[in-house]
Image (cartoon, coloured by chain):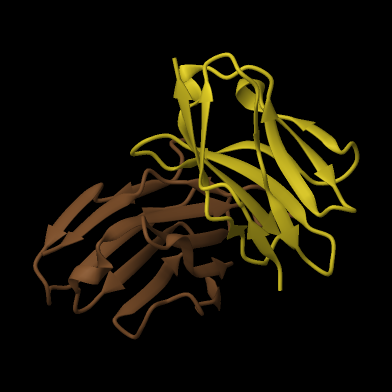
Chain colours: A yellow, B brown
Amino acid sequence: AQSVTQLDSQVPVFEEAPVELRCNYSSSVSVYLFWYVQYPNQGLQLLLKYLSGSTLVKGINGFEAEFNKSQTSFHLRKPSVHISDTAEYFCAVTLSSASKIIFGSGTRLSIRP
Amino acid sequence: DAGVIQSPRHEVTEMGQEVTLRCKLISGHNSLFWYRQTMMRGLELLIYFNNNVPIDDSGMPEDRFSAKMPNASFSTLKIQPSEPRDSAVYFCASSRGVDGTEAFFGQGTRLTVV
């Protein structure tokens, strides 16, 4: 069975600093990988996804993630964060269209001015 | 499209009462997921459907919880009887059910059982 691990429950950074949110997955077969963002009192929305091809995926709001098969990682990065990036970020994995989407425990990103 | 629509947005009920949460899928989507989110347990998958058929309900906490899809565009999650520990935000999400497509989430229902 597949699983997702987000080791950092909270990541505080200063505004305009770079940030990396870590995600590792476990699966014996190929997976599709996603990053979602949840702003306060809202549902989750998709930031980006990796299906195949180029291992560097670009998403909305200046975020990008890199798929590393050998390290089974899919870390999310942004070179310069803004106050508006304050949110909780979830990494997710799925095997195929008919299987469940498994989410990590989330990482709360807090931006300090 | 209006997106996934959940109702009500907030529900406060007394312990022992029946609670019904509702979800309208995005048109053309055929996979439906119910999640529960709490501070302690994070985001938990309760059940998911594909083409109106429940595929995996292993996340449903106990027999007090039940979910249905009476048609291709609508789902309900019922808790009977409700307990204070059921207090959480419940999310519904849908997807096109095609390889690699993401799930689209509703705004959630914040349930408080007193």
Image position of B98 (left or right of A41): right
Residue at 12% across, 73% down? B17
Position in image of residue A49 (x %, y %): 71, 41
Image position of A79 (left or right of A69): left
Residue at 38% across, 39% down? A42
Residue at 35% across, 77% down? B66
Residue B2, image quadrant = top left
- Residue B18 appears in the figure: yes
Image position of B52 (left or right of B65): right
Query: Of residues A76 and A57, which is closer to you in this image?
Result: A76
Query: Of residues B12 and A82, which is closer to you in this image?
Result: A82
> Up-down: is A91 above or below A112?
below
Q: Residue furthest bottom?
A: B63
Position in image of residue B67 (x %, y %): 39, 73
> Up-down: is A61 above or below B41?
above
Query: Of residues B9 and A42, which is closer to you in this image?
Result: A42
- Residue A96 appears in the figure: no
Looking at the image, how many numbered discs can be counted on the residues? 0
| Quarter placement of the N terminus of chain A | bottom right
Residue B99, image quadrant = bottom right
| Quarter placement of the C terminus of chain A | top left
Residue at 73% across, 58% down? A25
Position in image of residue B55 (x %, y %): 58, 76
Position in image of residue B73 (x %, y %): 46, 56
Image position of B99 (left or right of B16): right
